[in-house]
Image (cartoon, rainbow, N blue to C red):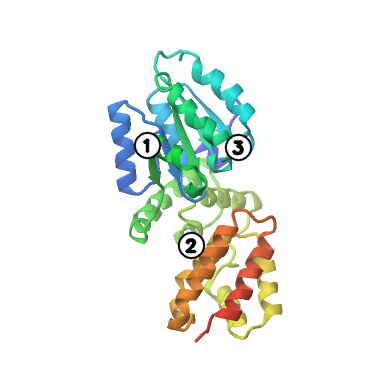
Amino acid sequence: MKEEFLWVEKYRPQKIADTILPPQLKDVFTKIVESGKLPNMLFSGTAGLGKTTVAKALCSELDLDYIVVNGSEEGNIETLRGKIKRFASSVSLQGDFKVVILDEADYLNPQSTQPALRGFIEEFSDNCRFILTCNFKNRIIEPLHSRCSVYEFNTSKKDMIDLCQQMMIRVNTILDNEKADLQLSNQDLAELIMRYGPDWRRVINELQRFSIGGTQIDQSLSADNYAVLFKALKDKNFKTMRSWVANNVDVDTSTIFRHVYDHMNTVVVEASIPQLVLILADYQYKAAFVADNELNIVACMTEVMAGVDFL
């Protein structure tokens, strides 16, 4: 077989025990494997947290036939009636039930595909289970919520310490296996993990990018770099702010919003913090739908300049 090139696929965990998840969530999935009983499930959370990995690992450990349908690419009613119905209605070669993994299910049409899926879950309950993954569970209609066990892949700051330590071990193992001579210190790796975690997929992808390019971890999102943004916002310097956004737009937008949120107590007047939180939450939600991320971030920072008082 052709060797997998992408590290994120090559080192995708095949067992729940190998996943990097908050302990309370990992315990639930471990018990599901031990029981051998798989319910219909809905996984929600931001990108890269392991939703699809967990779905595949559950099917692998329980030795179940499954297919993966991407809702953003095959989210029409024809796919449901054709591909999914044919798979769900046929008998498993293993003699057990089958599983349909609907990835990015929040892209399924809420007027046609999602209501039809509601009936499919009930019609094929004796033969098939459904696992839905989504970034925004509010885009999944309520009847699907009630037919699935809902699990939120949220990571608290308390969990992050242990999870980042686990990821440090994982990336060192990957570098050893790939014989990648990046000359990265543990401090460099820790910075990479803290910058993009808990998006573990992004961490591994960035690690592979550095290995291919032979470059070191850049400092584009260091504290000093954000200091430039905060000063521009305080001085209401639109030109500098727009330039900063243009130079950093390739970064995951949630990382930018999160950094501003994490450091707001040190740069914003206390009375303005509630307003800043509302602005950041509004534009982070919009980031999932906009065609131009740079324009969305500039619009967010412009509103911050106009409505927030800085220290």
Looking at the rendered image, the quarter that the N terminus falls into is top right
Residue 228, quarter of picture: bottom right
Crowd around label 1: few <14 · some 14–19 · many ≥20 (10 Å): many
Residue 146 falls left or right of residue 70: left
At 52% across and 47% down in the image, what residue appears?
A: 139
Q: Label 2 amino acid? A: Glu
Q: Earlier in the sequence, mark 3 or mark 1?
A: 3
- Where does residue 82 sit, x and y in percent of width and height? 61, 22
- Where does residue 81 sit, x and y in percent of width and height? 59, 24
Q: Could you tell me which secondary element the residue under label 1 belongs to? A: helix
At 56% across and 31% down in the image, what residue appears?
A: 69
Check disc 2 and report the residue beneath it. 191
Q: Label 3 amino acid? A: Phe
- How far apart marks 3 and 1 lie (CA) works out to 23 Å
- How far apart marks 2 and 3 lie (CA) works out to 25 Å
Check disc 1 and report the residue beneath it. 16
- Where does residue 17 sit, x and y in percent of width and height? 35, 38
Q: Label 1 amino acid? A: Ile
Q: Is residue 303 above or below residue 216?
A: below
Q: Is residue 282 above or below residue 123?
A: below
Q: Earlier in the sequence, mark 2 or mark 3?
A: 3
Residue 212 falls left or right of residue 21: right
Crowd around label 2: few <14 · some 14–19 · many ≥20 (10 Å): some
Residue 60, quarter of picture: top left
